[in-house]
Amino acid sequence: MRYIVIGAGAVGGTIGARLHQGGHDVLLIARGPHYEALKHEGLRLITPDSDETLRVPVADGPVPTRDDDVLILATKSQDTIAALAPWPSDLPVVCAQNGVANERMTLRRFERVYGMCVWLPAQIPHPGAIAASGHPYSGMLHVGRYPQGVDDLGEQIVTDLGKHGLLARSSPDVMRWKYGKLLSNLGNAVEALVGQAPERTEVVRLARAEARNVLESARIPYATPEDEAEIRGHNVDIRPIEGMERTGGSSWQSLARGSGSIETDYLNGEIVLIGREHGVPAPVNEVLRREANRVAREKLPPGSMSAQSLLALIGEHPTI
């Protein structure tokens, strides 16, 4: 099989690099300066133990496809529809993304859809380079057919992912793991808005408590932090990389790049949506969704809001 990684950023690039190191046929899809650097200089993969430059094939848009191609989608959720639009709908798609909406969006046009729950700490220090700080493995990936189950192709994908530098698991209940990851990602907006302010922990606690109430009211199962700790163990510990300062998470990075968009509608906004569908208020996550979108739209830098201002907005809601 050939793996086409659509969105070869920090996560997609690491997955593509590790598949390439495992001997698999890989094509990275990137854009802008990152694409130019990958094309002319190769992909520099930096880990706590190594620093390698890999010559992985790269393109900046759709290419002629083969019957044995597998698409790995690693874009932000707000880009899913546009990213998949040029690709043939008879190919299988693996959604290596945060949030829980991508699989359903993809299933509208593609028959074979797989969810992937991604635990993979990485960032792009400069175009063409990826710093993956997980140790001893760069990441752990749960893979399963959407909406549930496993099949032969999914098992093959798991086997291929696990050949070099990654741990992969077949998960018939992959969406349970992705809902658990969604809960952890609710703090992304808080970090992006207020940085590392001490008060951020209280905001994150409120957002997650509210989200658990929403999911339980909707009878949606989710993996707990205890479930994750048992499976993950110390297989993907974050280690420092010499000369690299670890920045914030994916939402923080979106604001730092001044991209004008952020994934919060599909993280905190997902909790708001489920709450509205089931008549359960979610005011904390609505404040975070609204404010993160405002800051992204105004292209303000991460940490531009005070924690006191954010808490004041949250405290305006009498249900909290």
Image (cartoon, rainbow, N blue to C red):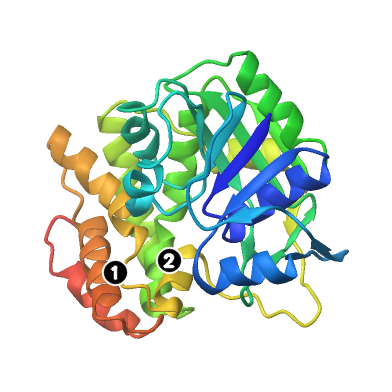
Image position of 309 with respect to 261: above or below: below
Q: Residue at the spot x=25%, y=31% of the render?
A: 217
Q: Position of residue 73 (x, y in %)?
A: 50, 43
Question: Disc 2 residue type?
Answer: Ser
* Picture quadrant where residue 132 is located: bottom right
Could you tell me how far apart the alpha carbons at marks 1 and 2 are, in whole angstroms? 9 Å
Q: Residues within 10 Å of mark 1 (few under 14, many from 20)?
A: many
Toward the right, the furthest residue is: 49
Left-right relation of 49 to 74: right
Residue of label 1: 292
Residue of label 2: 251
268 and 311: which is toward the camera: 268
Image position of 103 with respect to 53: above or below: above
149 and 124: which is toward the camera: 124
Which of the marked residues, 1 or 2, is nearer the chain's N terminus? 2
- Mark 1: which secondary structure? helix
Split into 4 quadrants, where in the image is the C terminus? bottom left
Q: Position of residue 75 (x, y in %)?
A: 46, 52
Do callouts 1 and 2 mark residues in contact (Cβ within 8 Å)? yes
* Picture quadrant where residue 50 is located: bottom right
- Mark 2: which secondary structure? helix
Q: Position of residue 316 (x, y in %)?
A: 13, 69
| Residue 129 in sight here | no
